[in-house]
Image (cartoon, rainbow, N blue to C red):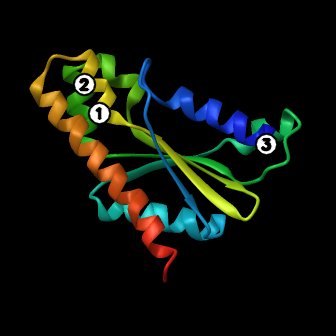
Amino acid sequence: MRLTLLILLLAALLRPALAQDLFMVRSQQPFAESMLLLQEAVREQGYTLSRVQRVDIGLTKMGYETDKYRVVFFGKPEQVRRLTREHPELIPYLPLKIAIFAEESDTLLVAANPRHMAEFYGDDELTAVFDQWAVDIQAMLDRLQAAEGM
């Protein structure tokens, strides 16, 4: 229970200030399978996997027992370059990220809802980008849930 609360707190740090909604999926797939499926889903949505960061090392140093917690970073390289050049205030939010972690026999995936960034910009072009990211992230998570029935 403590680990779940800590993970939700960490996930909250991934989202923009004042945003309330998170995308969250619980999968009964093992962590390793879910991790592979997530990476495939990222590619299938047309994104490039940037890196996978281990978070569990810091958690175990704090006394938590977990070896299965990662943050998956992804984006479309040209889009990320253009957006950070034209809107440097987006740099902290890019590349996009999904946290994935094991909780007992389940795997949980959490991502910030990018649509909430539109609240801070009056730019229709950016709103369209945020909306597309939200659709794509939801499709990635839906793919993991659909894999459970297989």
Where does label 3 land, which residue?
Answer: 1
Residue 10, located in which quarter of the rendered image? top right
- Residue at point 43% right, 34% down? 21
Tag 3–tag 2 contact (CB < 8 Å): no
Q: Which residue is the site of mark 1?
A: 115
The residue at 68%/41% (across/down) is 55
- CA gap, disc 2 to disc 1? 6 Å
Front label number (3 vs 2): 3
The residue carrying mark 2 is: 118
Q: Nearer the viewer, residue 20 or 101?
A: 20
Residue 100 is left or right of residue 120, and the answer is right
- Provide residue 46's location: percent of width, then percent of height: 26, 58
Which quarter of the rendered picture does the N terminus lie within? top right
Label 3 sits on what residue type?
Answer: Met
Rendered position, 102 above or below 5: below
Task: Say left or right for 102 vs 124.
Answer: right
Residue found farthest to the right: 63
**Amino acid identity at mark 1:** Arg
Q: Is residue 118 visible?
A: yes
* 19 over 46 or under it: above or below: above
Looking at the image, residue 7 sits to the left or right of residue 62; the answer is left
> Does dot 2 land on a helix, a strand or a loop?
helix
